[in-house]
Image (cartoon, grey):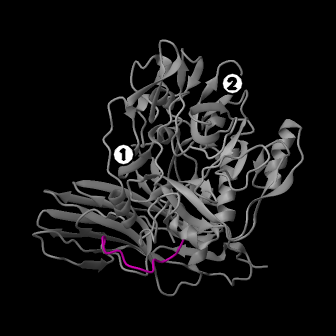
Amino acid sequence: MKKKENIIIIVVLVVMILAIVGVSYAAFSYGKTGSKVNSITTGSITMTYTETDNTISLSGALPTTDKTGTVRLNPGEYFDFSVSSEITGDVNINYEISAKKEEGNTIDGRYIKLYLTRLTDDGSEEGLMTPETYNEESSANSYTGRPSGEMSLYTSSMNSSESNNYRLRMYVDEEYNPQGDGGGLTFSVRINVYGQAGDKYVPLTTQKILEDNELQEEKENMFNYASNGNYMNIDTYEEANNPEYVTNGLYSMEDEDGISYYYRGNVDNNNVQFGEYTNDYYVYYDGAGRYFQTLESCEAYTESISYGTCTQVKLASAGDKMYWKIVRVNGDGSLRLIYNGTSTETIAPTRNNIAGTYAVGNSPYTLRSQNDAPKYAGYTYDRDTNETDSFVKKEVDTWYENALGSTIYDSMVIGGRFCSDSSEYHYDETSLYNVFASYDRLVQVMNGFTTSNSPTLKCPATSESYGGAYRLKVGLITADEMVLAGESYQTSSNTYLTQLTQEVVDNSFFTMSPRGVDQIDNSSSIYTCSYSYLFYDVGTNVASVRPVINVTTNNGFTSGDGSTSTPYVIQ
């Protein structure tokens, strides 16, 4: 039997190809191989790409998991480089980092994964993509100058002088079986940086949304109210209404990547058809209103409560289209979508039915809560030792892999930003809970609105080994996004998230935002979107699971106007 240690990965040192074009500037194109620093200057623009001396050169590399491959720091396991600019005047540079495989590779690129991060000022790393196997773009990017036939790793823009440090890792995918491969296999790439001056890239989908919606202005203290004007009277703790604070439509707020445009209120023009079930899709029912992605997860739950028998039930049929609601246009131009089911009708699951509803499951957030808090409030935990997925993350990931991961639609779903905010864990005397920063941002009603609610689209840094910022193919909505959508803490609303087409006595779905930990029994709690408002539930309790994805396309919407009868279509 041949040894597995025969795989070799080599990264060939980088070439920069840079084209900068702008008003009053001449057009330049530049490329040089093997130089450590490549730069081009045009008038008031200078863009520089600098390599460090370290390269990736793995000998005897074994197939590895993403959790291992994305954190390697030994010599030869990563490659650092920087992209910087010196800009004066009103100039924007769109740039793109890409990979191009070398000739003569002897292992297929579909077995090689690449992962790019940005090094922050405090020395930590910010993921810029999910680990992806090598795949080349079939079309060029006219905004950055990247040609076709290269793998796009990251796209951004610069309009002021700045410097960004990046780190690349490359490793053999765990799916590769090296037995019988003959040994001595190699795979090499060049890392290229392309830049071009011009207007910041605005995707066709964003252009269409801005054409179809009049951008609204945020009102002062708007987030103290539900979008229908309802609010909690802090003197009587009874619900009241202020019609001046009825807020519906498209609004804007900054996120980490630029300006994000978010939908708020009872809008009905944010419907999207994207993807379809290629096969009959089944989930497992425990007989008591809970639905799971696998028999194993169903049995793990029923065993934990010593009740229930798991049987298979159909969630969707082969050929059923998937429908989504647009939560927002992200700052990078991608669309953030929340699952709505197999129609544009917003239907909540019931105890005896989940087919055709906005949920793909109905399960606990975690099987561990009491006396083990607070880490089990995180979307993942034990990051500093052996990072472990929460129960709900496993359910969401399984649904995505089975429903979209192996389809043609997967290539349009990017590794988007997600946030499980575990920052500023502290004791709150009003709630008698240990709470996270999101409580102070979103639940000021409990403090008599001494300050206003202030949702954010920027994930706060955390020192905890659970939760935090993620780059994922699929996740859940955040409590901040719910408040932006028009939900309010314990105050009824009628937003697109909860505007159901049937009467439901009690239904809620999980966010991925931790709320806090009860001082009495140490039970961790998670924010939920209840029947008509923002609330919370203990992590071991059950709520619906609504996946969230981030989608990008160069072709815009193929049809539709976003309405329930004629949704936008992405193909």
**Residue 404 location (% of width, % of height):** 63, 65
Q: Quadrant of the rendered structure where residue 460 is?
A: top left
Q: Nearer the viewer, residue 135 or 392?
A: 392
On screen, residue 153 versus residue 96, left or right, reads: right
- Give me the disc on residue 100: none
**Residue 196 location (% of width, % of height):** 25, 70
Q: Which residue is mark 1?
A: 251
Q: Residue at x 41, y 52 (%)?
A: 119
On screen, residue 350 versus residue 185, left or right, reads: right
Give the amino acid type for the residue marked by disc 1 in the picture: Tyr
Q: Quadrant of the rendered structure where residue 2 is?
A: bottom right
Q: Which residue is mark 2?
A: 522
Q: Is residue 457 above or below residue 112?
A: above
Q: Within 10 angstroms of label 2, few (less than 14), some, or many (20 or more) residues? A: some
Give the amino acid type for the residue marked by disc 2 in the picture: Asn
Q: Is residue 227 above or below residue 344?
A: above
**Quarter containing the N terminus:** bottom right
